[in-house]
Image: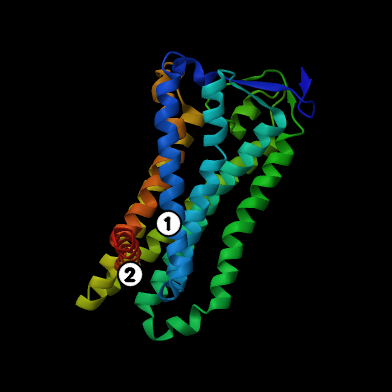
């Protein structure tokens, strides 16, 4: 029995099945991480440098991409270093930091998607009032909520977890997550369970709000061909991203809380990291391909640079 405040090392037993082909996994994951950073940063710089994209929808998209880089940085560098070294351990302070980064980014994703749904609702259902309602000040306030609320709520959970008395040091995952630490506690933690279910309820509330918003949007767009076109161009990417993030999060949630020990380790590993691989890689591609203004700006910059290089 060890107090969690001491500097102990956790063993990440999810690596057991990767020992034989860890160099191949390292190569694939390094390429994946590079692509995630490159694609997301490209979209972020596109929005920042192009004045025509300085609108709430694109600013929210920019923050979604920043969050994608933030979340994967909490996982990939440590994961890649472990694959190279063959030492699959992490300090308690490092574990808490990883929990903080990864799960605050997940919550941030959902709140940003909720803000984007609200923005599209106002733009399509109340177009004449859009610029009055979605001012730059309001967009800035929404962005503050998108970042501050996740950081504060996850900080509270991390602080509570840091007070637990631990009776074990083996985490059955490729990275640290809060429920694994709670399961290692010598005594049941009612407060941690309550906080965990509160967060799940918050995610579900955001999901319901987005569904309600899009129900209203579909009703409005059904009456006008112009609104249908706007919905297809700006809202369909949002729906695809929402489904992508939700499915990925459900994979992790179901595995973490209710996962069977009889499942193959490789399948459990995929379920655990799916939300750290697929959404950050696919989301900017979905928006980059579907949003005409973003796609045109990216292609313009690409062809301009290509032309310079060729000449």
In the picture, residue 139 is in which quadrant? Answer: bottom right
Using the image as rendered, state which of residue 291 and residue 172 is in the foreground. Answer: 291
Report the mark closest to the observer, 1 or 2.
1
Crowd rating for badge 2 (residues with CA inside 10 Å; few <14, some 14–19, many 20+): some
- Residue in view at x 56 percent, y 75 percent: 138
Q: Which mark is residue 42?
A: 1
Crowding at mark 1 (Cα within 10 Å: few <14, some 14-19, many 20+): some
The answer to whether 212 appears left or right of 79 in the picture is left
| Residue 256 screen position, x and y as percent | 51, 30
Q: Residue visible at 61% across and 34% down?
A: 178
165 left or right of 210 in image: right
User: Does residue 94 sit above or below 261 in this rendering?
Assistant: below
Q: Residue at x 69, y 46 (%)?
A: 155
What is the secondary structure assignment of the residue under circle 2? helix
Question: Residue 81 placed where, x, y %?
Answer: 56, 28
Q: In the image, is residue 271 above or below residue 113?
A: above
Which residue in the rendered view is the most extreme toward the top?
20
Q: Residue furthest front?
A: 311
Q: Label 2 belongs to which residue?
A: 293
Mark found first going from the N terminus, 1 or 2: 1
Relative horizontal placement of residue 108, taking residue 301 as reference (left or right)? right
- Cα gap from disc 1 to disc 2, whole angstroms: 14 Å
Q: Quadrant of residue 181?
A: top right
Q: Could you say where residue 84 lies in the image, as x and y percent from the top left?
A: 53, 23
Rendering quarter of residue 229: bottom left
How many dots with numbers?
Answer: 2
């Amino acid at each position: 029995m060890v107090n969690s405040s001491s500097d102990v090392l956790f063993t990440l037993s999810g690596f057991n099945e990767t020992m034989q082909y860890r160099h191949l996994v390292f190569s694939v994951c390094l390429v994946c991480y590079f692509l995630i950073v490159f694609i997301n940063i490209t979209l972020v710089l596109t929005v920042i440098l192009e004045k025509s994209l300085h609108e709430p929808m694109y600013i929210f998209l920019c923050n979604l991409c920043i969050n994608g880089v933030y979340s994967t940085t909490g996982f990939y560098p440590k994961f890649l270093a472990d694959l190279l070294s063959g030492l699959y351990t992490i300090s308690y302070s490092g574990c808490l930091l990883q929990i903080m980064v990864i799960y605050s980014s997940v919550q941030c994703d959902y709140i940003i998607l909720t803000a984007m749904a609200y923005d599209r609702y106002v733009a399509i259902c109340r177009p004449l009032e859009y610029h009055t309602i979605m001012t730059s000040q309001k967009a800035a306030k929404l962005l503050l909520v998108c970042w501050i609320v996740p950081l504060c709520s996850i900080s509270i959970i991390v602080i509570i977890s840091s007070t637990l008395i631990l009776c074990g040091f083996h985490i059955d995952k490729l990275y640290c997550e809060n429920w694994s630490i709670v399961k290692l506690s010598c005594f049941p933690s009612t407060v941690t369970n309550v906080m965990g279910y509160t967060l799940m309820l918050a995610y579900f509330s955001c999901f319901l709000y987005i569904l309600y918003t899009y129900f209203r949007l579909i009703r409005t767009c059904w009456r006008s061909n112009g609104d249908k076109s706007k919905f297809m161009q700006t809202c369909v990417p949002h729906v695809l991203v929402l489904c992508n993030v939700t499915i990925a999060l459900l994979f992790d949630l179901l595995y973490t809380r209710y996962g069977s020990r009889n499942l193959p380790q490789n399948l459990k590993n995929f379920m655990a990291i799916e939300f750290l691989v697929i959404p950050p890689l696919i989301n900017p591609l979905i928006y980059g391909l579907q949003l005409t203004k973003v796609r045109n700006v990216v292609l313009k910059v690409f062809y301009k640079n290509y032309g310079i290089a060729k000449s």
